[in-house]
């Protein structure tokens, strides 16, 4: 991320356990503010108070609140890619339905495990200069899913991967927007929609 503007990057990387713990505390405090009070209440002073650290300590690692938001976004994205890659690695060892179930579950965890946090970070994304990173993420998701679909002989895997990513994201976003709390039901509906697209039985 060296080409990113400095104000959205971590000022320095923690090198000791205590420093790492401080950064993690700051990030979790930030996440809790975002999911309970929203982006409007997100300030470095509020984060420092919630984390129990001084503003000076916070600024040792994060030059701006945007740097905190960016790291939270990057971490969520890294977790999603890792989960999808794990599912792809197992794709040729199990049936297509099981693979679909794994991908859908990974997507829902990314989007709705902490829905308030996800919504706040989505709003933040629109204000941060990370469009290039977002495009890389989208392409990576398509490549991973397409490779897995190809292993199962799905025709036009790239096109199918794009369609399925859009379908899953759209249904997950709608569930989050309307405050759906029964994630098991939402996951089941998304699976049925994906099965239908792929011509699989329910």
Image (cartoon, rainbow, N blue to C red):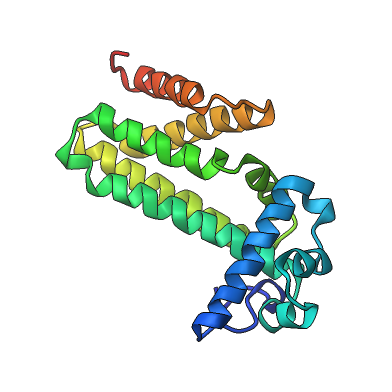
Q: Residue at 40% across / 18% down in the picture? A: 192
Q: Residue at x 51, y 24 (%)?
A: 186
Q: Is residue 28 visible?
A: yes
Q: Pinpoint residue 25: horizontal percent, then vertical percent.
A: 62, 68
Residue 157 position in % (x across, y down): 31, 36
Q: Is residue 159 visible?
A: no
Relative to 26, say whether 170 is above or below. Answer: above
* Residue 93 as seen in the image, left or right of residue 179: left
On the rendered image, what quadrant is the N terminus found in?
bottom right
Q: Image point 76% across, 70% down: which residue? A: 48
Q: Which of 79 and 88 lies nearest the eye of the viewer?
A: 79
73 sits left or right of 126 in the view: left
Determine which quarter of the picture holds residue 21.
Answer: bottom right
Classify the position of the C terminus by image quarter. Answer: top left
In this figure, what is the number of numbered marks? 0
Q: Outermost residue, top direction?
A: 201
x, y percent for residue 166: 51, 34
- Residue sitting farthest toward the left: 93
Residue sitting at x 66%, y 56%: 31
Image quarter of residue 151: top left
Q: Position of residue 65 (x, y in %)?
A: 75, 68
Q: Is residue 104 above or below residue 189?
A: below
């Amino acid at each position: 991320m060296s080409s990113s503007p400095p104000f959205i990057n971590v000022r320095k990387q923690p090198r000791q356990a205590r420093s790492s713990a401080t950064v993690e505390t700051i990030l979790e405090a930030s996440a809790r503010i975002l999911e309970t009070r929203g982006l409007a209440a997100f300030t470095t002073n509020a984060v420092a108070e919630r984390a129990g650290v001084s503003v000076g300590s916070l600024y040792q690692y994060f030059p701006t609140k945007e740097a905190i938001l960016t790291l939270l976004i990057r971490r969520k994205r890294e977790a999603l890619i890792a989960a999808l890659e794990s599912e792809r690695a197992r794709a040729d060892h199990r049936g297509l339905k099981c693979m679909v179930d794994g991908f859908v579950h990974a997507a829902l965890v990314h989007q709705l495990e902490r829905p308030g946090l996800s919504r706040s970070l989505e709003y933040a994304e629109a204000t941060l200069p990370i469009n290039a990173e977002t495009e890389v993420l989208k392409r990576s998701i398509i490549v991973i899913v397409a490779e897995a679909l190809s292993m199962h002989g799905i025709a036009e895997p790239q096109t199918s991967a794009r369609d399925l990513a859009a379908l899953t994201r759209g249904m997950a976003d709608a569930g989050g927007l309307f405050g759906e709390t029964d994630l098991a039901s939402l996951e089941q509906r998304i699976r049925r929609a994906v099965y239908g697209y792929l011509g699989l039985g329910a």
